[in-house]
Image (cartoon, rainbow, N blue to C red):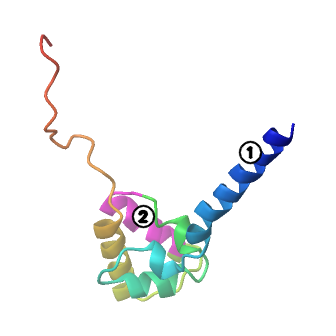
Amino acid sequence: MNLRISLAAAAAALCLVAVGPVLAQTPDDALPAGPGRDVVVRVCTTCHDATQFAFARHTADEWDSEVTKMQGAGAEMTAEEQVAITAYLAKYLPKPALDAPSDAKPPPGR
């Protein structure tokens, strides 16, 4: 019984140590550096924590739709800022291409 409690306590402590750096991230840490990041942080993090969208992946058209939707929901941005935000998100948080060529070769006999 004591061993089980000790193992549970050790596992809980390990989880806290592993999660600490993630919780300590600022919005700037969650987003890749690049042109437009400052606009994204200023406009988008007014309502959202950057970690809410920093791991999202969309096509340029999907990001444009999201930004337009947020503008309709009250996000305040100029037309130039909307272009900058969409360009940043499309460049740094793109949806991976599913049909990208692969270097993997099929197994022999297939």
| Residue positioned 13% across, 28% down in the render | 105
Q: Quadrant of residue 90?
A: bottom left
Label 2 secondary element? helix
Where is mark 1, residue-wise? Answer: 7
- Of tags 1 and 2, the one toward the viewer is 1
In which quadrant of the rendered image does the N terminus lie?
top right
Where is mark 2, residue-wise? Answer: 65
| Vertical order, 12 against 107 (above or below) | below
The amino acid type found where label 1 is placed reads: Leu
- Percent position of residue 95, x then y: 33, 54
Main SS category, magenta section:
helix
Disc with the residue nearer the chain's start (1 vs 2): 1
* Range shown magenta: 57-70
Residue 60 placement, left or right of 26: left
| Residue positioned 74% across, 45% down in the render | 7
Alpha-carbon distance for marks 1 and 2? 48 Å
